[in-house]
Image: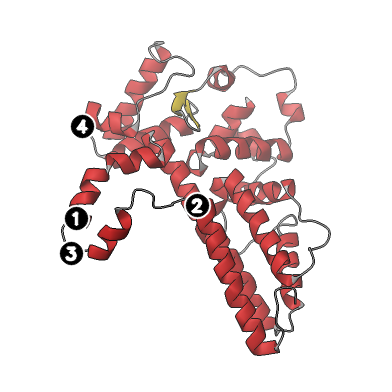
Amino acid sequence: MEAPPYARIVEVIRTRIEAGELSPGDRVPSTRRLVAEFGVAMATASKVLAALRRDGLVRVVPGVGTVVTGDEAGPARSGARRGPSVESTLGRAAVVRAAIGIADAEGIDALSMRRVAAALGTGVMSLYRHVPGKDELLLLMRDAVFGESPVPSAPPSGWRAGLESSARALWRLYRRHPWLARTASLTRPAAGPNQLPYSEWTLGVLSGLGLDDHRVFHLHLTLFNFVHGSAASLEAEHREEADTGLTGQQWLEQREDATRSVIGSGRFPVSERIFSDPDLPFDLDDLFEFGLARLLDGIERLVERETGLTGRGA
């Protein structure tokens, strides 16, 4: 049976790497270049890079693109060991740390048990002694990064300052680890011991406002969903930059003519007026702060209406 197009291209790139045409650290063709060179669809080109990452042949370097892995991937491919005691020192914490490093650098789609084993210089089956599978690994990764930034022992004075503090701490965590946005579900929560202090903090602040528990619960989830939803754009941008090799600004510039042709058609006068402003501010951190302030304004009005308490320091 003939191999699918993406698999054939993977073998071409693999051959170039093994022949030395592409050396460690060299950029491999971006999805756009793969489309032009092989005449395939963008989805196929993205699948090629994902397969190369999964096999440990390439990695994503933020701000650079997808490059050939260095000597760190060699031992896993050749079967050599990275020292005399890889197996004896391997533990759950080491597996989780390696997985976090891969997800931070290459995105969650590049993560697999095989890829983690390659990074650790060990066999795939040895990982299963410590982690049952990828789903459990993702939960452990999520809880581990929350442990990097524990909440303070006590919230600042005033409920608004307390909620701002927890929301901003969570946003910074998503900023450092964009893949977190793909590992949490509002409808299927699986909180670990390092995540629950964030919930406890927010619930504690809200519980001091005199609202009933149902209101507290809904406000807690609304705040989390705002941060989590905003962070989805961080993860998407990280993934798109890795797949295309283009920054967000470069992508916008490349699409400018096509966008203008639609907006400037005369059918969307308000959009044309606003989007044509060259000084239009667009920054995810600014959008987060603006949205958080408006959300807290709404909570303040709710508290005033239902409890009679007024003032941001209530």
How far is the residue under mark 2 from the one under mark 1? Answer: 26 Å
Which residue reaches farthest top?
A: 20
Residue 162, placed above or below residue 13: below
The one nearer the camera, 142 or 239, is 239
Marks 2 and 3, the one that precedes in the sequence: 3
Q: Is residue 196 left or right of residue 121?
A: right
Q: Position of residue 104 (x, y in %)?
A: 57, 39
Residue behind mark 4: 39
Q: Is residue 267 left or right of residue 252?
A: left
Residue behind mark 2: 284
How far is the residue under mark 4 from the one under mark 2? Answer: 35 Å
Marks 3 and 1 close (CB-CB < 8 Å): no
Residue behind mark 1: 264
Marks 4 and 1 close (CB-CB < 8 Å): no
Marks 2 and 3 close (CB-CB < 8 Å): no
Label 2: state its secondary structure: helix
Label 1: state its secondary structure: loop
The one nearer the camera, 310 or 138, is 310
* Mark 1: amino acid: Gly
* Mark 3: amino acid: Arg
Marks 4 and 2, the one that precedes in the sequence: 4
Q: Residue at x 62, y 40 (%)?
A: 100
Question: Which mark identifies residue 267?
Answer: 3
Q: Position of residue 145 (x, y in %)?
A: 68, 47
Examine the rendering and report whether any part of residue 218 can be seen: no
Residue 314, quarter of the rendered image: bottom right
Residue 194, placed above or below residue 63: below
* Mark 2: amino acid: Leu
Label 4: state its secondary structure: loop
